[in-house]
């Protein structure tokens, strides 16, 4: 999907003008789009306010990001997550080794 030239606030403001009784052709001309674009905006954003439209966009972006992840494993981790987990495991293992040596020395 191509990036829109208009922000959600502009689209919703145009839709509110159409809902108030202005002709779609006039509103479209003022916004530099076709009347068909106004109707497409109405199908996508009709009845929403600006906050709802922004939240819907964020949800679509997150959904797109999640669908781009590999489906080979449900436990897929990004390289950064894997590196953080690996460094945590090294620290944890070092603690176990030092704790084992301390316990062995005390026992014996």
Image (cartoon, rainbow, N blue to C red):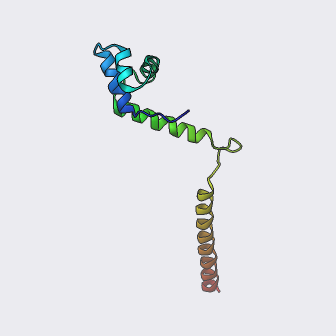
Q: Is residue 82 left or right of residue 17?
A: right
Q: 95 above or below 81?
A: below
Q: Quadrant where the C terminus lies? A: bottom right
The residue depicted at 48 percent of the width and 36 percent of the height is 59
Q: Quadrant where the N terminus lies? A: top right
Q: Position of residue 64 (x, y in %)?
A: 56, 37
Q: Is residue 24 left or right of residue 96?
A: left
The residue depicted at 35 percent of the width and 30 percent of the height is 10
Mark yes or no: residue 47 visible.
Answer: no
Q: Quadrant of residue 17?
A: top left
Mark yes or no: residue 46 visible.
Answer: yes
Nearer to us in this view, 74 or 70: 70
The residue depicted at 67 percent of the width and 43 percent of the height is 70
Q: Position of residue 26 (x, y in %)?
A: 34, 17
Q: Quadrant of residue 80?
A: bottom right
Q: Is residue 58 left or right of residue 15?
A: right
Nearer to us in this view, 102 or 64: 64
Q: 106 above or below 66?
A: below
Q: Quadrant of residue 93?
A: bottom right
What is the number of callouts on the image?
A: 0
Q: 33 above or below 21?
A: below
Q: Residue furthest left?
A: 20
Q: Residue furthest right?
A: 72
The residue depicted at 33 percent of the width and 17 percent of the height is 18
Q: Position of residue 61 (x, y in %)?
A: 51, 38
Nearer to us in this view, 2 or 102: 2
Q: Position of residue 21 (x, y in %)?
A: 29, 13
């Amino acid at each position: 999907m191509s990036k829109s030239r208009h922000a959600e606030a502009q689209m919703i403001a145009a839709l509110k003008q159409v809902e108030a009784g202005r002709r779609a052709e006039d509103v479209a001309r003022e916004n530099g789009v076709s009347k068909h674009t106004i109707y497409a905006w109405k199908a996508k954003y009709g009845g929403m306010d600006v906050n709802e439209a922004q939240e819907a966009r964020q949800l679509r972006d997150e959904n797109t990001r999640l669908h781009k992840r590999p489906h080979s494993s449900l436990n897929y981790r990004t390289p950064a997550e894997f590196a953080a987990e690996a460094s945590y495991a090294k620290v944890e293992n070092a603690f176990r080794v030092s704790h084992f040596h301390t316990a062995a020395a005390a026992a014996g």
